[in-house]
Amino acid sequence: MNAHVSAAHSQPAQVTAVPPPAPELSAAPRAFRGAMRKLAGAVSVLTVGQGEERTGLTATSVTSLSVEPPTLLICVNRATSSVVPLLKERAFSINVLRPHHEPVADRFAGKGGLKGPAR
């Protein structure tokens, strides 16, 4: 980190931290960052698995951790039926919902008792 020092006539010198310039990002990290900037306060659907083992859930706790590598933090209740497939697969998708997607959010929240592939 660089520092900039300035002094006034009769006042003590002040030190101001100047961070180094941010490195330029390639297209994929810029796109990831742009998508994450739109995520604040969103309801998302997390899906995992394939075929009859696919399932999903709604998530409001999705946070961007880094651009390089693109990393998300999700917080999932251990009691949800989606935890076992999520831990087994170690891969998932996140779909950010818009207000008109409320029926999708309800379905993945398990309203109506839906589980697994029925969601």
Image: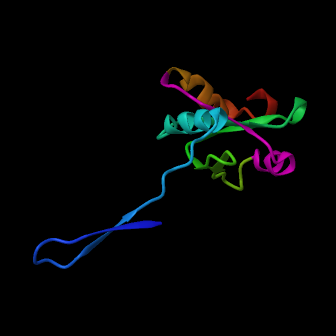
Q: Residue at x 48, y 52 (%)?
A: 21
Q: Is residue 110 visible?
A: no
Q: Residue at x 62, y 46 (%)?
A: 67
Q: Quadrant of the C terminus?
A: top right
Q: Is residue 79 visible?
A: yes
Percent across and percent down for residue 11 are 14, 77
Q: Residue at x 54, y 34 (%)?
A: 34
17 with respect to 61 (left or right): left
Q: How many marks?
A: 0
83 with respect to 73 (left or right): right
Percent across and percent down for residue 65 are 60, 52
Percent across and percent down for residue 46 are 69, 38
Decide: is 88 above or below 10.
above
Q: Residue at x 10, y 78 (%)?
A: 10
Residue range (magenta): 81-99
Decide: is 16 above or below 42.
below
Percent across and percent down for residue 33 are 56, 39
**What is the quadrant of residue 55 in the picture?**
top right
Closest to the observer: 11 or 65? Answer: 11
Closest to the observer: 72 or 54? Answer: 72
Closest to the observer: 95 or 11? Answer: 11
- Please tell me whether residue 82 belongs to the stretch shown in magenta: yes
In the image as oriented, which residue stretches furthest toward the left?
Answer: 10
8 with respect to 30 (left or right): left
Closest to the observer: 54 or 90? Answer: 90
Decide: is 43 above or below 22.
above
